[in-house]
Image (cartoon, grey):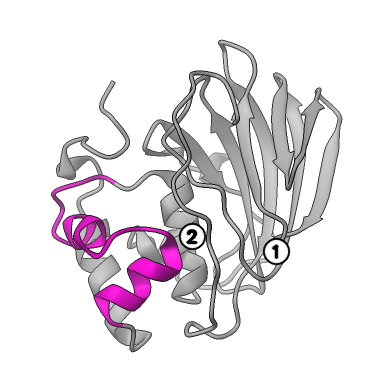
Amino acid sequence: MSSPETGPADELPVVAPQLRALRRQAALTLEAAARAAGLSPAHLSRLETGQRQPSLPMLLALARIYGTTVSELLGETVADRESVVRSADMEPTAAGGWTYWQAGAPGRGMQALRLHVPFGSQGDIVRVHPGEEWLYVLTGRLRLRLGDTTHRLAPGDSAHFDSLTPHRIAALDPAGVELLFVHTLLQSPTAALCLGGPTPSHTGEMP
């Protein structure tokens, strides 16, 4: 399996130009956007030129910063904003080892996803940003770290928390974990964010 940071660029061919275009549309410099996303300018530059593949958490963070959705980052478009999303229309998309299905319409104040998080560290960062997040475990067991507290969630368990609380998730089972995930989008693409730095990699563990 390709590393979430070093996989071939052609796995997500539309992302690179979209990342650059949306950053410029948000009137953010490479340095400012990278700082808000907890990345180095060089790393973000490589994402924008297709030299590296972004993970799904990175896409979520950048979507918040640019005031858009993962769908738009991936160049996905819909003719009309529908209220109902049919199961047959939910196409799986892979990003950095994570798989997600859009479970809501784009252009709303919230983004709804169905996620499959694989077992093992994805090189993710502990995130802190304005907004709220809600998740519901469908299958598998999830480790959720909120601040200094670690929670273990089983199928049927849910969590609803302020996104300003440092947070990170990881799958506890070798088969991974599947969950429903809803988060609020930033209304201002230039809103100031405070994200944590990279955390050490531990297979299946959350530091």
Q: Is residue 181 magenta?
A: no
**In this picture, is 98 found above or below 75?**
above
Residue extending furthest top? 174
Residue range corresponding to the magenta coloring: 29-53
Secondary element at image label 2: helix
Residue at x-position 32% and y-position 86%: 25
The residue type indicated by label 2 comes to Ala
Residue 61 disc label: 2
**In this picture, is 163 found above or below 101?**
below
Give residue 35's quadrant in the image: bottom left
Q: Is residue 22 visible?
A: no
Give residue 132's quadrant in the image: bottom right
Front: mark 1 or 2: 1
Residue at x-position 66% and y-position 53%: 166
Q: Is residue 170 visible?
A: yes
Residue at x-position 44% and y-position 69%: 36
The residue type indicated by label 1 comes to Leu
Please state the horizontal and vertical placement of residue 133, each as a whole percent of the image: 72, 56
Q: Is residue 31 magenta?
A: yes
Relative to residue 15, is residue 100 drawn left or right? right
Give the quadrant of the C terminus.
top right
- Nearest the camera: 119 or 95? 119
- Nearest the camera: 124 or 62? 124
- Would you name the residue on which mark 1 appears? 164
**In this picture, is 41 found above or below 54?**
below
